[in-house]
Amino acid sequence: MELVSFIVNDKKVELAVERNWTLLKVLREKLDLTGAKPGCEAGDCGACKVLLDGKAVNSCTTNIMKVQDRTVTTVEGLSKGTELHPIQSAFIEAGAVQCGYCTPGMVITAKSLLDQNPHPTEQEIRDGLDNNLCRCTGYVKIVEAIQLATKKLEES
Ligand code: FES
Ligand code: FES
């Protein structure tokens, strides 16, 4: 086992890990942060996305040793107590959630996208969702949710 320390959702953590563990495994099994979902576990579906130093990454293909001294934000870290982040409430208001399995990853990707480009076109939103798969919604409501989130973020 090796010690690794990093910041997750504004809290410093230090853990004993095996060198081959993924960030997804550590979040879910050692830190009880189960918002990031195991889907393909091969970097293809985006269900496991988290922010690493502010950029969306697949936590299933991120080796835990690469996270040393870095900052991780999971979907749990976006809300403030019981107050949802504007992107999270936009997904609910737009009806962009069906089974919900892809939703945490979609919200994280949307956060990363809107941080870099606060006023994306519809095509830029669709391009930004290229690595996030949804089997339920057909993406229309998800795109609408991100468009609604841009308005909410402007007003907040
Ligand atoms: S579970 Fe990580 S990309 Fe699919
Ligand atoms: S809402 Fe079911 S996979 Fe996207």
Image (cartoon, helix red, strand yellow):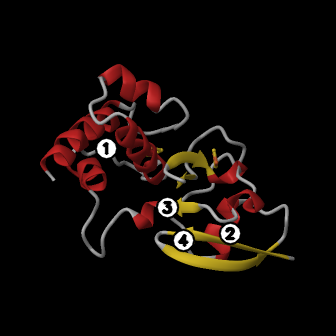
Name the kind of residue labelled 3 in the image: Thr
Residue 139: image quadrant is top left
Instruction: Find the distance from the CA under tag 4 to the CA under tag 2.
Output: 9 Å
Name the kind of residue labelled 4 in the image: Leu
Question: Would you name the residue on which mark 3 appears?
Answer: 74
SS class of the residue under badge 1?
loop
Residue drawn 31% across the image and 44% down it = 96
The outermost residue toward the top is: 123
Q: Residues within 10 Å of mark 1 (few under 14, many from 20)?
A: many
Q: Residues within 10 Å of mark 4 (few under 14, many from 20)?
A: some
Residue drawn 31% across the image and 55% down it = 88
Question: Would you name the residue on which mark 2 appears?
Answer: 26
Instruction: Find the distance from the CA under tag 1 to the CA under tag 3.
Output: 19 Å
Q: Residues within 10 Å of mark 3 (few under 14, many from 20)?
A: many
Q: Quadrant of the N terminus?
A: bottom right
Instruction: Find the distance from the CA under tag 1 to the CA under tag 2.
Output: 28 Å
Name the kind of residue labelled 1 in the image: Ala
Question: Would you name the residue on which mark 1 appears?
Answer: 96
Q: Are marks 1 and 3 in contact (CB under 8 Å)?
A: no
SS class of the residue under badge 3?
loop
Tell me where residue 76 appears, x and y as whole percent: 43, 66
In this rendering, position of residue 94 left or right of residue 44:
left
Instruction: Find the distance from the CA under tag 2 to the CA under tag 3.
Output: 12 Å
In this rendering, position of residue 86 left or right of residue 47:
left
Q: If you read the primary sequence from the N terminus, does the residue marked by circle 4 or circle 2 appear first?
A: 2
Q: Are marks 1 and 2 in contact (CB under 8 Å)?
A: no
Name the kind of residue labelled 2 in the image: Val
- Please name whichever residue, 87 or 3, is drawn nearer the observer in this view of the structure: 3
